[in-house]
Amino acid sequence: PAARYSKHVFSVNRRTLRPPSRRSLRCPAPPFIAGVMTVEASEEPLRLLVVEDNPADVRLLREAFVEAGITVELTHAEDADHALHRLRAGARADAILLDLNMPRVDGRAFLRALRSDPALADEHVIVLTSSHYDRDQRTCRQLGVEDYLVKPTDFDEIVETARHIAAVAGRQV
């Protein structure tokens, strides 16, 4: 169902201190950003599929990419089942950001399904979760994730995590 996904493209031009024109926006800026910034479309955004059941975490991640000055296209799937459906329908991303603890199909089951599907087995996955458990980290490594990150709680750390995600996904920051 299309209503379960959202897509946002944004970057920050910190040299501009006036409000953005309507033509410079591909989507509205997140409403939680303090200060006045220009949000502009970029030619080559970092494309991320965010598989996360908590919309607040997705908003924080969006803000962190803006703060880091990284142009990103976030597509949000609220659970692993919807992400698999979207990927099997042909959606592609530079990387998939995956939470492990979700309802219905959790992140571990998503990884197993992804790796067992020949058309999707090579997708780049970065786990971004609240789980500190060694067994989760081992399982994810065995299933070929690019990186395993524990969700930070401080916004400055979230910004650093956004920079790290971009670097892991192959973008210079």
Image: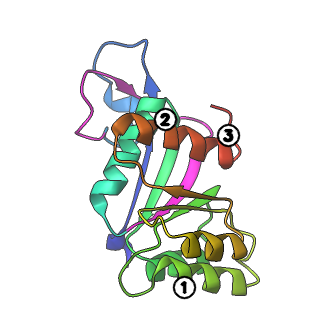
Say whether residue 32 is magenta: yes
Q: Residue at x 63, y 40 (%)?
A: 44
User: Is 131 located above or below residue 107 in the figure?
Assistant: above
User: What residue would you read off at disc 1?
Assistant: 109
Secondary structure under badge 3?
loop
- Measuring from the top left, give residue 105's x and y in whole percent: 45, 85
User: What residue would you read off at disc 3?
Assistant: 171
In the picture provided, is 87 more to the left or to the right than 35? right
Q: Nearer the viewer, mark 3 or mark 2?
A: 3
User: Is 72 located above or below residue 36 in the figure?
Assistant: below
- Measuring from the top left, give residue 146's x and y in whole percent: 68, 60
- Measuring from the top left, give residue 68's x and y in whole percent: 48, 31
Q: Earlier in the sequence, mark 1 or mark 2?
A: 2
Q: CA distance from mark 1 to mark 2?
A: 35 Å
Whether label 1 touches label 2, CB < 8 Å? no
What label does residue 41 carry, if any?
2
